[in-house]
């Protein structure tokens, strides 16, 4: 079997050295100066070792313990030397995400103590969830009730409901279209948590 050194085409330092036959050169005697070129050529032809390489077909076959991995459908990325898909996590070719289409909006009465019901209806149609805060109208109970009636009429036209987030009905939530609200658990305030 070939060694690692022969695989790279290098001589094996641990292999036994093939010695040239110094006895033959001593028996032939020292050549004269005139015959030096002839003997050096003959030495070159006789002293050059012939390295025999094992044919590749005689080498034992080694089966890879790895299983072949199937390529994902529509794979267009790089492939490793083993034929596996290479996922470069540093590659920044991700598509930029667009801005969200839905939002949570906070609405409070303006300086004139009005609630913009038309703007709220447009936002609800787009899927936004609206939180209406009537806590600024602390001493105006009749005006709070008027704002609640306006919100109730607007939500009836749009087809959604109004949900109270506190026990005094001063913090109201209006879900947008296609927003699911769980109404089975309606414990309000901090008392149920204790």
Image: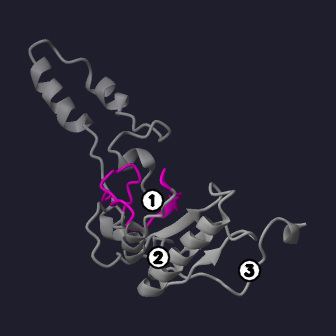
Q: Quadrant of residue 186?
A: bottom right
Q: Quadrant of residue 59?
A: bottom left
The secondary structure making up most of the magenta span is: loop
- Lower sequence index among marks 2 and 1: 1
- Lower sequence index among marks 3 and 2: 2
Q: Is residue 154 above or below residue 113?
A: below
Q: Secondary structure at mark 2?
A: loop
Percent across and percent down for residue 46 are 22, 37
Q: Quadrant of the C terminus?
A: bottom right
Percent across and percent down for residue 189 are 79, 67
Q: Which residues are magenta?
A: 86-112
Estimate the spatial distance between the alpha carbons at disc 1 and disc 3, rounded to whole Å. Answer: 80 Å
Residue holding disc 1: 1
Q: Nearer the viewer, residue 91 or 178?
A: 178
Residue holding disc 2: 176
Q: Residue furthest top?
A: 33
Residue holding disc 3: 186
């Amino acid at each position: 079997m070939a060694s690692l050194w022969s695989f790279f085409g290098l001589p094996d330092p641990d292999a036994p050295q093939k010695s040239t036959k110094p006895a033959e050169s001593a028996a032939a005697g020292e050549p004269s100066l005139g015959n030096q070129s002839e003997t050096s050529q003959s030495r070159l032809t006789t002293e050059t070792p012939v390295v025999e390489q094992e044919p590749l077909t005689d080498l034992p076959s080694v089966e890879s313990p790895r299983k072949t991995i199937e390529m994902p459908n529509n794979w267009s990325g790089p492939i490793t030397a083993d034929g596996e898909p290479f996922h470069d996590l540093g590659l920044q070719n991700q598509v930029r995400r667009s801005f969200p289409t839905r939002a949570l909006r906070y609405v409070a009465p303006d300086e004139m103590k009005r609630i913009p019901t038309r703007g709220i209806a447009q936002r609800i149609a787009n899927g936004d969830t609206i939180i209406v805060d009537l806590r600024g109208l602390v001493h105006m109970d009749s005006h709070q009730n008027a704002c609640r009636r306006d919100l109730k009429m607007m939500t009836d036209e749009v087809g959604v409901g109004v949900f109270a987030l506190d026990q005094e009905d001063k913090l109201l939530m209006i879900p947008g279209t296609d927003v699911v609200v769980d109404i089975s658990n309606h414990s309000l305030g901090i008392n149920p948590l204790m």
